[in-house]
Amino acid sequence: MKKLQYLSDYLGRIIHVRHKGKLLMLLNQVLLKMAIIFIVACSACNAEQQNMYTSPDAVSVRPVFFVPEGQSAPTDLMRNLAGRHIKWSQETYSKLLAGRDTFRISPEPPVICKGKYDLSCYKKLPENGAPNFLSEILDYLNMNRFNCPYVFVIIVMNEKDHFPNGGGRPLNGGLNTGGGIVLWNSFNLISCPNNQSTLRHELGHAFGLPHVDVYGYPMNSNASIMSYNRNHHTTGFRESKTPGKFIPEDIRALSLNKRVFPNLCFDSIQDVPKDYRLAPNIIHLGPMKIPNQAPYMVLASTWSGEAFGSKASNAVLGQINTSEGPGNTYNSDNMWHSEHVGKEMASLEMVFPVAVEIDKIIIHSQHSGLSHEAKAVEVNIIAHDSVLKVAKQRLVGIDAPVVFKPTKALRWRLDFKPSDSGYVVIRGLEFFLDNKAVFPPLVNLAGAKRIQPRTEKEQSGEPAHPLD
Ligand SMILES: [Zn+2]
């Protein structure tokens, strides 16, 4: 800014000498305006850079009409049908969750995205073309899998047949990691009788719900919308006589997706009927592979050993449990347990698929409410094989933050000071920039406790421009 001001003054002086008069003032104004535009553009660009890998605070549902080459744009009838169906699903979710919460619908208009190829090309691609539709839509909206604040309901324009089959997935897997997709097609939208029951099921997937068979329940007869129970089928806009509902496992999982359902808390008394045997484990879906997008993964390794069947990789992008008794709640599937390191530090190295900027890490250590907490941490980055120390801090508590100046790197190393036992157990790590999550874990039971419901104003969710 100073330099431009100087340039403006300098040019101004030259012109002033030669011409005097109003030209000087005009030029001064133009140059100043240019300087302001330049600075605003730079700060916007910095913010954009910063937000590239941070997760959205909230996720809403947004319809997308994907128009492959040779297909027509959606008609008003189609836009209207899609809008009504999404709205009906929204109301149904609210009813099934006893009015505690439902998903929000984006107030923005539906996206109309022109595809690069024709339908015959997409038909040859894996997973019904879902990763490619998604990749093109993210590019079109200039966002990525990390910062995408939408569950896209993608309606692929297709005049002739049922391609692509219905489907749904969270982009990054897990239960609170960002956006998702539902796959649908315009042929079914117009002609299929049970669009609504299918949409409820696919939205469930997009919010992170698996099928009920993962918990050992029968797919053809279970009461959950996440089964294939034909008795749940709707007919047009007519409800089934026996509509699907959420079983306790579904509500428990949805309650962890705070970006979609910030006000939903799982209540083991209200939500679990007497004599119901709740499946003990939360099962989640995995991240998608998306063309042109970095993978949702962080590599972790250690030279401090992986004791008692644990893995260093369990410390990142896994499930973070709480450290509670009674008894031994150590779980080798989702914790990292170092070998005995005595008074030495226990080290964990992480490589992200992209250079991430971070200014806070929450360290969840210890298990069973008593064993092997980390007493202190040193945060380091590794660049060109040299190690740079970013922070060194005593850890107060077993779910403790370490805060440092924003630092960008691909490779990070955390050195933990063990408790008197000479071991360290890490239940999981959370990364943040400016209090926004970076690569959030797939399931976070320890962090769920921390999140506050939205304020009333934010909850109202009344769209500024209703869907047409
Ligand atoms: Zn399914």
Image: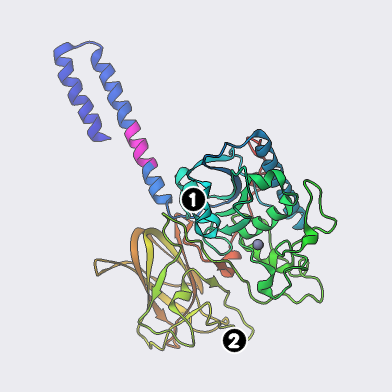
Residue at 25%, 30% (x, y): give it. 5
The percent coordinates of residue 118 (x first, y second) are 50, 45
Label 2 SS: loop
Determine the image quadrant of residue 448: bottom right
Give the position of the N terminus as an image quadrant. top left
Q: Position of residue 25 (x, y in %)?
A: 27, 17
Query: Element under label 1?
Result: helix
Tell me if residue 172 is in the magenta stretch.
no
State the image coordinates of residue 232 (x, y, percent, origin top left): 78, 59
Q: Amino acid at mark 1?
A: Cys
- Disc sitting over residue 212 in the figure: none
Disc 1 marks which residue?
121
Decide: is 256 above or below 329: above
| Image side of residue 428 versus residue 415, left or right | right
**Image quadrant of residue 295?**
bottom left
Q: Say which of 435 and 111 sits in front.
A: 111
Q: Main secondary structure of the magenta part?
A: helix
Comparing labels 2 and 1, the label whose residue is closer to the camera: 1
At x 68% / y 45%, what residue is drawn?
A: 189
The stretch of residues the image draws in magenta is 37-44
* Residue behind mark 2: 328
Q: CA distance from mark 2 to mark 1?
A: 54 Å
Quarter of the displayed picture in which ligand 1 can be seen:
bottom right
